[in-house]
Amino acid sequence: MKYRPDIDGLRSIAVLSVLLFHLGTTWLPGGFIGVDVFFVISGYLITKNLTEQIERGGLSLIDFYDRRIRRIAPAALTVLVVTLLAGYFLLMPGDYASLGKSAVYSAFGAGNLFFFWHTDYFDREASLQPLLHMWSLGVEEQFYVAWPAVLALILRIAKRRRGLTISMIAVISAISFSVCLHELKIDPKAAFYLPYNRAWELGVGALIVFVPTLRSRVMAEVAGLAGVLLIAFGLFTLRHSDPFPGVNAVAPVLGSALLVWPRSKNWSGQILATAPMRWLGLISYSLYLWHWPVIVLFAHWGNSAAPTAVEAASLTVLSVGLAWVSWRFIEQPFRRSGSPIISIPVGITAAGTTAALAFIVIAYQGFGRRIGSDMTALSSLDVMWQWHCPRVKQIQGLDRPYCEFGAPWGKSTVKAIVWGDSHAEHMAPIIESAAEFQNASFLLYLECPAALGGHAQRIWTEVPGYVQRCTDMRQRAIKTLTADQSINLVILAASWSALGNVVSQDGTLKGHPGPYDIIGEGVRSLIEATAAPGRRFILIADVPQLHSDPVPCATSNYNHLLRRHCRRSDETVSTSDFRSFQGRIYDIFQNIAARRNDTDAVLPGDALCTGKWCDTELNGEFLYRDASHIRRNLLPATRRLYAKKIGLEKAITSSIQTLQASATDYIDHAGQPRSAHDTKLNR
């Protein structure tokens, strides 16, 4: 196949876009589309290569996979091994074990499947997964497995009829695109990671192989300019929060196809073919492999802080240097050496050896002893989230069974719903300790914050149908609370401070000063809709939100990990920052409670942030699981102390005692409920 220097130049654009995006460059918000540019290039080159082989008289799958293994495996496996070794010195045990798992999948070209199956809301955020970038190699390698046979069948059916070949590839690509659009609505993670949802991007590249060459200089210039503009549009206008791929991927994919399309000389091709662009394109594969582990491992060393401009420049130089060494001494020698009889089994053996190394990391649970026995309770996100839900309970009106804790529902005098998101989850053990031995039962009603679904709506494009789901959840709860008067305590807890993208039903702030006022209105309207004689409400505000994950610094005195010196701001948040960020929602909740005699407000930050810095330790234990969640595996004594310190124990005990003491007052001597105006709860 004839060498195309402009394609190497296009590779340089793709890898630079990804690199700058991963370094947090704000002026290039759509840099992640560089991966989609790579997909189009791969679709074109692989299809061109396979077609030439078939037209020369036959396709040797052994030769094809031999070339793919020698092209991909040596550098990729080297990166996996080096990252595993570096992780021993830099990663907490939970992160290190997760790295081992992702390395096993990545060694066999299935990194995308690992991140599809094993990442969710509570896994380490994507920015701290050292092998996250291997997902795209997984997509390509799975394409390489299926595409040779599919293309051979297409060419056999078409019998050199170019139009029929184009039509069949176009149909396959259109089906993939349609499925991608559907998946994007119901499961964005599947749309992003799974190969059949990305096949259309490679298919567009494949189509270019069979379209006529652009011989007109004018048309070549127009196509080149259009390609540049479409890619630039994606780079400068798309945001990571936009639904992707799908329609938002069309512009960069078509732009890449226009630049890959063979044509007569034009200015875009000449620029892409310049020596610096070609050089960067030649090392683009190795640069893609190395840059992400370098950035992420540096982030772990730096306690999750964003790199400064100087640090970002240094990381770029280091990544490029490693990429050149990898290209010169790993990629090039392996591409020129060996025969299929040797390279295929050697490649498989090398992948197996790498996976075996990763299995050792997994088997030893990330070598937890590195951080000291006193810190095992902080060893991983999973460990810090451990709390056993005693049982599940289905109550009439709700859509499914939910976690029930405390006294058995049917025998308790106080029946409570704890309603919210993960911030209701992290309060469950605290509530359990605060209400111990008080004959109260609690149902953990999870998904959306209670403020959402009525007056307030959260625009969250990453979660399809979120607005409707929250609306349905709220309506179910209101109907249940209206129909079931035995539910006499409602506790609302959520990540209120994270709801800065809340709007009213018409999509605007609708006269409110800000989103938190809309949240307040959503909470008020819910209480008004469900208030009843003999029912009380407790509003739990957010815990103080930290700027970054505090756990590595919290354990730094007990481990031997390589870490930059921890600043106080790495472990907690200043009281002034807390007030600035979360003060408004605290004021709103306090105001709601002050205006109602059936409502209490629990304000953790008021108790935790009394000095210059907010407290993150209690009873000798570090409280936080990450930047915004309290650990669920706190010792029972610490849970009780925490509940007492933030005022939750007082609010729950007061509510329970009031409800239990006044329960008989709601029934007259004939056994009938009193009217609402005869009943009044005293705070």
Image (cartoon, rainbow, N blue to C red):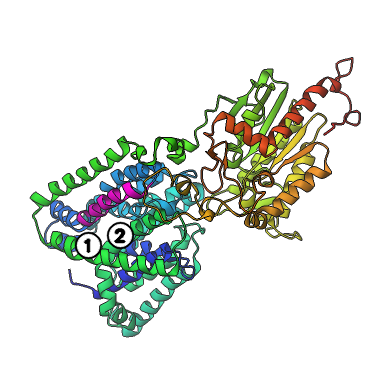
Label 2 secondary element: helix
Span shown in magenta = 73-91
The foreground one among 483 and 196 is 483
Residue 77: in magenta span: yes
Label located before the other in sequence (1 or 2): 2
Residue 87: in magenta span: yes
| 394 horizontally vs 203: left or right | right
Number of numbered discs on residues: 2
Report which quarter residue 222 is drawn in. Answer: bottom left
Vertical arrangement, residue 601 with respect to residue 334, above or below = above
Using the image, tell me which numbered label, if any, was put on residue 326. Answer: 1
Give the percent coordinates (x, y) of residue 432: 62, 29
For the residue marked with disc 1, what is the amino acid? Ser
For the question of whether residue 69 can be seen, the reply is: yes
| 306 horizontally vs 79: left or right | right
For the residue marked with disc 2, what is the amino acid? Trp
Using the image, tell me which numbered label, if any, was put on residue 543. Answer: none
Label 1 secondary element: helix
Give the percent coordinates (x, y) of residue 167: 33, 61
Residue found 53% across the figure and 38% down from its top: 621
Q: Looking at this view, name the residue that lies furthest to the right.
A: 678
Report which quarter residue 227 is drawn in. Answer: bottom left
Give the percent coordinates (x, y) of residue 516: 70, 54
Q: Looking at this view, name the residue that lies furthest to the top.
A: 670
Residue found 74% across the figure and 46% down from its top: 589
The answer to whether the residue labelled 1 contacts the one labelled 2, judged by CB atoms less than 8 Å apart, is yes
The foreground one among 616 and 313 is 616
- Disc 2 residue crowd, few under 14, some 14–19, many 20+, Cα 10 Å: many
Using the image, tell me which numbered label, if any, was put on residue 290. Answer: 2
Vertical arrangement, residue 339 with respect to residue 657, above or below = below
The quadrant in which the N terminus is found is bottom left
